[in-house]
Image (tube, rainbow, N blue to C red):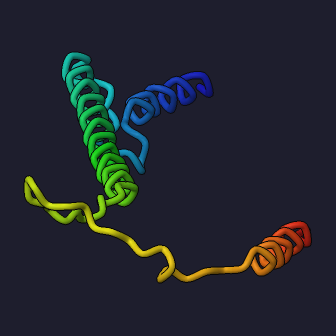
Amino acid sequence: MRAAVLILILAAASPAAAQPILGQPYYGLTLNRDPVLDGQAEAARQRAIGLDARTTRLETQGQTNAALANIAAARVNPGLPTVPLGAYAKPPIIDVSQLPKIPDATLAASNARILAAANNRH
């Protein structure tokens, strides 16, 4: 008698065991997914990641090129304007006596102060 009751309880319990877990009502659907669709979805995801990385790389490369162009433009020294002379014009004469003069002793003292300040760094 006990064996019959035990068999009856086990027979009633087996369909309940085949039911999905209480917190996962769609558990059976995840097991029956199509592997081809999974592969296509994964490939699409990888393509999106690749495109995003490529776009980011191109944006940063453009910003780098713009920064390098700005640096190169800042390095260019504009040439001094020249005075156009006629075919028979004489070149200008510069009177050297009118230029400012700095005595050699003053230049040597200034150079000594600069070297002392440069050697004073830690």
Kindly tell me whether residue 57 is visible in this rendering: yes
- Residue pictured at 10% horizontal, 56% vertical: 88
* Total labels drawn: 0
- Residue pictured at 25% horizontal, 61% vertical: 91
* Image quarter hosting the N terminus: top right
- Residue pictured at 52% horizontal, 23% vertical: 7
Relative placement, left or right, of 117 versus 78 is: right
Q: Is residue 38 above or below residue 68?
A: above
Furthest residue toward top? 36
The image quarter containing residue 74 is: bottom left
Q: In this view, does 105 lie above or below 92?
A: below
* Image quarter hosting the C terminus: bottom right
Relative placement, left or right, of 99 versus 91 is: right
The image quarter containing residue 25 is: top left
The image quarter containing residue 5 is: top right
Residue 23, image x, y percentages: 42, 50
Nearest the camera: 4 or 120?
Answer: 120
Kindly tell me whether residue 25 is visible in this rendering: no
Q: In this view, does 41 lie above or below 39?
A: below
Residue 68, image x, y percentages: 37, 49
Nearest the camera: 59 or 12?
Answer: 59
Relative placement, left or right, of 79 versus 117 is: left
Residue 77, image x, y percentages: 36, 58
- Residue pictured at 89% horizontal, 72% vertical: 116
Nearest the camera: 102 or 52?
Answer: 102
